[in-house]
Image (cartoon, helix red, strand yellow):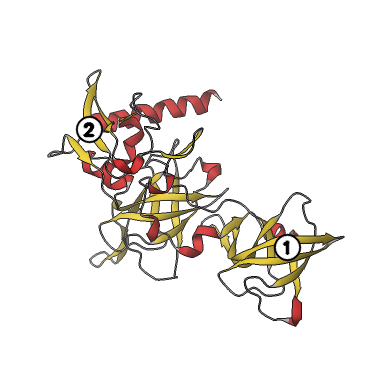
Amino acid sequence: MRKSLLGAALLCLMSWSAIAAEGPIKNGHPDTYTVVKGDTLWDISNTFLNTPWLWPEIWHANPQIDNPHLIYPGDVISLVYIDGRPRLTLSSRGEASRTIKLSPKVRSTPIDSVIPAIPLDKINSLLKRSRVVSSLEELERAPYIVAAAQDKVISGVDDQIYARGSFEANAPAYGVYRQGDVIVDPSTREVLGVMAVDLGAVDVKQIEGDIATLRVTRSDREIRSGDRLLESEERRIDSTFFPSAPGQRVEGEILAVSGGISQIGLYDNVLVNLGERDGIQPGNVLAINRNLTVVDEKRKQQLTLPEHRVGLLMVYRSFEKVSFGIILETNEPLMVGDRLENP
């Protein structure tokens, strides 16, 4: 416990050291900025800060404004100094954040218009709902589809299907998944998880023993016999986290890129071998580094060049041992195997 507290304190100190060394505020920064539709927190942070992932250290929640951590189009963000330190704060609200009166006692805030941390339309649609389970055994223990009504081979929305397995009495809905790739750490050969590829969703109509009658409520891909059922969980990408540095020292690498392309560019979605056990959470920014190995022709030797930074990514979903991230900055084409560490 003492070591973890000491480590957190050192990282906090290092964060402020980084601010002091480089200067937190960009040259030519605006004093105020009016948020527009299409902005992201990364864009806004980049407008003011040399190190956008240090937003939590710079952000000041204005106590005079409701929900000051939620930012909407039309809101005005100002640069102020508090106790001699630069702070960004929400100085006024725009129309998009106005509450909607639903009844004399109920008011609703338009949460869907909140400015997200990253461009949500760039997140791979498959990864929004797909999951990483800890092992093949976990997936193989899950209930599985055995048949569809009318002997259908492929099922879609509103079709009735049947599944077998152990069902939770209080679980009214399940997600439908198919086994994807087994994720193996290239260095340690540890199995980091298994992709459970999202296919759709079902509602439970009836359970008799170990057989459940289900209705397909969503079908993004073909649903077949043998596909697995996992209890439904909220798959919407959280849009309200802030750019941040990891809370502890981390080192990892890019394992894969969505689409299986050979080179990785801006807004590509990647899988990394860092997860919740490493303290990784949505919003964490990771530096992408590379040290090339070349051949010294004069000495006929392989030579590893000094490491250099080639980009930044932000984690948007984390699992026990791996995470999904999106590339936010790149100086050159990135590759699977590029190293990751604290920014």
Residue that mark 2 sits on: 78
- Left/right placement of residue 290 relative to residue 6 reads left
Q: Quadrant of residue 293?
A: bottom left
- Left/right placement of residue 204 relative to residue 194 reads right
Give me the C-alpha separation between circle 1 and circle 2. Answer: 53 Å
Considering the image in quadrants, where does the C terminus appear?
A: top left
x and y percentages locating residue 208 in the rendered image: 86, 61
| Count of numbered circles on the image | 2
Question: Considering depth in this image, is 143 or 289 the residue closer to the camera?
Answer: 143
Question: Considering depth in this image, is 160 or 294 the residue closer to the camera?
Answer: 160
Question: Considering depth in this image, is 41 or 195 the residue closer to the camera?
Answer: 41
Badge 1 marks a residue whose secondary structure is: helix
Badge 2 marks a residue whose secondary structure is: strand
Q: Quadrant of residue 124?
A: bottom left
Checking the image for residue 140, the label placed there is 1
- Left/right placement of residue 123 relative to residue 276 reads left
- Residue type at tag 2: Ser
x and y percentages locating residue 163 in the rendered image: 77, 67
Compared to residue 130, the image places residue 158 above or below, namely: below
The crowding category of the residue bearing disc 2, from other C-alpha atoms within 10 Å (few below 14, some 14 to 19, many at least 20), is some
x and y percentages locating residue 121 in the rendered image: 38, 59
- Residue type at tag 1: Glu
